[in-house]
Image (cartoon, rainbow, N blue to C red):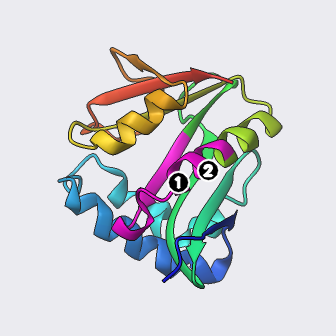
Amino acid sequence: MSTAFQIRPIRPEDNAAMAAIIRAVMPEFGADGPGFAIHDAEVDTMCEAYAAPRRSYFVVERDGRVIGGAGIAPLDGGEADVCELRKMYFLPEARGIGAGTAMMQCCLDAARKHGFARCYLETLTGMDQAQALYLRSGFRPLDTPMGGTGHFSCDRFFLREL
């Protein structure tokens, strides 16, 4: 199995794979109870959900198989110039090969193209590799959440100027 990967926009045929990844990764970090993204309606129809204006979702593919994804969308209940990095989940085999850094750059570039000035994200204690990536990518921790994502179980919040 190669470590080479590609990042591309999500396609309808990727929906089932991304839903399975989200449902596999979130419980790994204890993020499967109420107030987590695993319960969002868009999980089963990611391609369609991110086809709306000012939204983009990308997948990481290796050896013809989707192994992760991430996207950006306007922050629900937030200011018009703020987007949210959403649904960034990678299978274990996608970790440590540079896919997270490449995906982050892809999402931030898309956010700029959509006219956003800031990017927000929320995560939780225990997702240490993800938080290290966010800090390396220029995000700074916030004390309180922004917007109204409905993810009341998340306890770590970050913001980055674009």
Q: Which residues are magenta?
A: 85-105
**Residue 49 x %, y %:** 62, 61
Residue under label 2: 102
Measure the C-alpha gap from mark 2 to mark 1: 6 Å
Q: Residues within 10 Å of mark 1 (few under 14, many from 20)?
A: few
Q: Residue furthest front?
A: 2
Residue type, numbered disc 1: Gly
Is residue 12 shown in magenta?
no
Where residue 96 sits, quadrant-wise, is bottom left
**Residue 133 x %, y %:** 45, 38
Residue under label 1: 98
Whether 137 is drawn above or below 99: the answer is above
Whether 132 is drawn above or below 142: the answer is below
For numbered disc 1, what is the local secondary structure? loop
Residue at 56% in and 26% down:
78
Whether 82 is drawn above or below 29: the answer is above
Foreground of the two, 147 or 32: 32
Residue at 54% in and 36% down:
76
User: Marks 2 and 1: CB-CB under 8 Å?
Assistant: yes
**Residue 139 x %, y %:** 50, 25
**Residue 92 x %, y %:** 34, 66
User: 61 left or right of 121?
Assistant: right
Residue type, numbered disc 2: Ala
Foreground of the two, 43 or 128: 128
Q: Nearer the viewer, mark 2 or mark 1?
A: 1
Q: Residue furthest top?
A: 143
